[in-house]
Amino acid sequence: MEFPAPGDEGFARADPSAVGLDPAAVEDAVEFHLTTGTPPEQVAYDFSNQEPWDESEGELGYTLGPMPDRRGGPAGLILKGGRLVAEWGDTRRVDHSFSVAKSFLSVVAGVAWDRGLFELDGRVADSEGHADDGGFDSEQNESITWRHLLQQTSEWEGTLFDRPDSVDRNRGVGKTGGPGKGEGRDLEEPGTHWEYNDVRINRLALSLLRLWAKPLPRVLAHEVLDPAGATRTWEWHGYHNSDVEVEGRTMRSVSGGGHWGGGLWASARDLARAGHLLLAEGRWEGTRLLSADWVERAIEPCPENPNYGFLLWLNTDRTLWPSAPESAYAMLGHGQNVVWVDPEHDLVVVLRWLALSDDREGREDLPNQDRFLRRLLDGV
C-alpha cells in the first residue's frame, strides 16, 4: 500500500490496468457520475425552509452557522492501493461535506479513546470537563455513555444552541415508514433506539470539545490531517451561538453536519486522505495516527441499526450497496457526498454531488451510489 505525499500534488497516478482495474469499467463509472450529478436545485444550502417547526417556532428557522456561497459540480476520485487511478471534476474545490463531518467526529473520538480519555461504556457525565456541564444531569440523560453518542442511540433530551432534540425526532434517515420528522415520540431508554439526530451529534461534538479542552479543528489538524499530508484549505465551523467556556477559555463548538449551517468544508482530495487512513486501519506510512482497535470497533454493526457503526455507514448483509462487499463502509453526507472504503479491493472512492437515484434502469429504488459502484467493481 502506498501513501500520497503531502499536499494537493502528492497523489501518485497509476493507469487502472496497472493496478488490476479494467480501464473501460472505470471510465463507465466516471461517465455515470458525470451524467447523474445532483441538479443544483435539488440541494439547497439553506435548510431553514424545510423544517416542520419553522412557522410555529419563528426564529428557530434561521441557520446558525456560515454556509458556502455556492456549491461545486459533480466531482470525484478513485484510489487503488493509495494511487490515483481516476479523477473528474474539481477535486481541489473546498465544498460542504454535510454529514461526512459526523465521521470526522468519530476519528477525533478515536484519537481521544486511544489516549485513554474515555471508556466506550463509561458515562459521559463522569468524563473530564463535564462536572459543571449540566447536559447529562437529568434522569433521561445521566446514564448515557460515549458508545450511545457514537452510535446515535443516546436518546439525549434537551436544547443545545437554540435547537431542541425534538426537532430531529423521527427523522427518516436510515429508516422506512413511521411518523414524520419532528412529530412527537416518547423517548426510550438510552442505548435502545437508533435515531439520526443532529442536535445529539452536536452534543457529542461539545462533549469531545470539553474532553480535549481544545477546539476540535485544531485536534483534527494536529493529530490526523496534518500528519496525513492534507492541505490547510479545509474548514470546520460551528454556529454564531456555539461558543462555550472550557477551562476558562472561550472556544467554539463545531457542528456535525450542515443542518443549520457550519460543518466541515473540504476538498475531495483531503477527504480521500481520511478514507485512505481508515483503509490503512489508522496508519499513515510508518506513523500510527489512529489505532487499528478503534477502526475495528468503529465498523462493528450497531445492534439497533446493523448498517451503522461509530458514525460510519456499513454494508451489513449488503443492504446499502448490493453490488459491493459486505466489508465496505462509508462516510455519507447530504447531496451524496461520499467517502467509500473497500478493504477487500483496496479502494477508496470519493463522490461529490451524485443524484440520489433515477429510473434509467427501471429501478427507482436502486440508489445511484450502488449503480456507480457496480460499474466500477465490474472492472476489478
Image (cartoon, grey):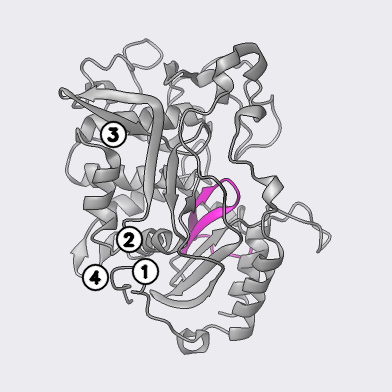
Residue ID at (41%, 47%): 103
Q: Secondary structure at mark 1?
A: loop
Q: Which residues are magenta?
A: 322-341
Image quarter (top left, top right, bottom left or bottom right) of the C terminus? bottom right
Q: Which mark is residue 8?
A: 1
Q: Secondary structure at mark 2?
A: loop
Crowding at dot 4, Cα within 10 Å, few <14 / some 14-19 / many 20+, comes out as: some
Which residue type carries mark 1? Answer: Asp
Splitting the image into 4 quarters, where does residue 238 fall? top left
Q: Which residue is mark 4?
A: 285
Q: Which residue is mark 2?
A: 231
The first of marks 1 and 4 along the sequence is 1
State which mark lies toward you, 3 or 1. 1
Please tell me which residue lies in front, 309 or 18: 18
State which mark lies toward you, 2 or 4. 2
Where does residue 118 sit, x and y in percent of width and height? 22, 35
Which residue type carries mark 3? Answer: Leu
Which residue type carries mark 2? Answer: Thr
Crowding at dot 3, Cα within 10 Å, few <14 / some 14-19 / many 20+, comes out as: many
The residues bearing labels 3 and 4 have C-alpha atoms spaced at a distance of 27 Å
Up the image or down, 305 lies above or below 289; here it is above
Residue 323 in the magenta stretch? The answer is yes
The residues bearing labels 3 and 1 have C-alpha atoms spaced at a distance of 29 Å
State which mark lies toward you, 1 or 4. 1
Horizontal side of 234 relative to 131 (left or right) equals: right
Crowding at dot 1, Cα within 10 Å, few <14 / some 14-19 / many 20+, comes out as: some
Residue 53 seen by the camera: no
